Amino acid sequence: MDLKQLYQDIILEHGKNPRNFGKCENHTNEARGHNPLCGDQVQIFLKMNKEKKVENLTFQGSGCAISIASTSIMTELVKGKSIESAKKLIELFLTMIKSSEETKFDECDEDEKTKIMSLSGVTKYPMRVKCATLAWHTLSSAIEGKKQEVNSESID
Ligand code: FES
C-alpha cells in the first residue's frame, strides 16, 4: 500500500468512527468553533489535572470527513500530554497545514506521526484547510480559557 492510500484510509476511518466523541465529565475547559461557510460546528471539552496534563479531551459537533478526522486524531494525540506539549503540537500542526513546510513531530511516536501526517495532503486543497484546522484553533482557545467562539473565517 502506498503512503497516499494509507493516509486516505486513516482519514476515512477516523471520519467514520471518530474517537473521543461526546462530552467528557468534569471537564475544566471548553470552547466552541464554527465554520460559517458550511455551518459546521465543533465543541471541545478538556479536562486538565493539577499537574497541567490533559487528562481527557473529547468533542462534539458535525463536519465533513476531513474536519471530523482531524478533530478525532487531535484528541487521540493530545490526550495524556502536558499542556505545554499540546500547545507545541497545535503550533506544529498549523505550520504543516498552512505552509506545507516539512514538519518534525519530535514528541510523537511513530504511530502518532503517521496519524498526524495523514492530514498533510490537505495543504494542496485551500478550501479544505479550514476544515482541518478549526478543531485545533478551538482547542487552543479552550486551553487559553477564551470565551468567544472561534470563527474559521476570522483566523488565518
Ligand atoms: Fe464544513 Fe469541512 S465542509 S468543516
Image (tube, rainbow, N blue to C red):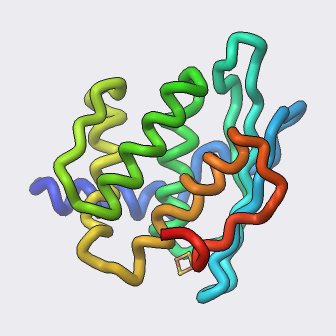
Residue extending farthest to the top is 51
**18 or 156, which lies in front?**
156
Screen quadrant of the N terminus:
bottom left
Nearest the camera: 141 or 69? Answer: 141
Q: Position of residue 126 (x, y in %)?
A: 34, 79
Quadrant where ligand 1 appears = bottom right
Residue occupying the point 47% across, 44% down: 90
Report the side of 151 relative to 78 (left or right): right
Residue 65 screen position, x and y as percent: 49, 70
- Residue 122 position (above or below residue 109): below
**Front residue of this view, candidates 15 and 92:** 92
Q: Residue at x 48, y 47 (%)?
A: 73
Residue 133, percent from left and from top: 49, 62
Residue at 17 percent of width and 48 percent of height: 102
Q: Residue furthest bottom?
A: 37
Name the side, left or right, on which 5 lies relative to 105: left
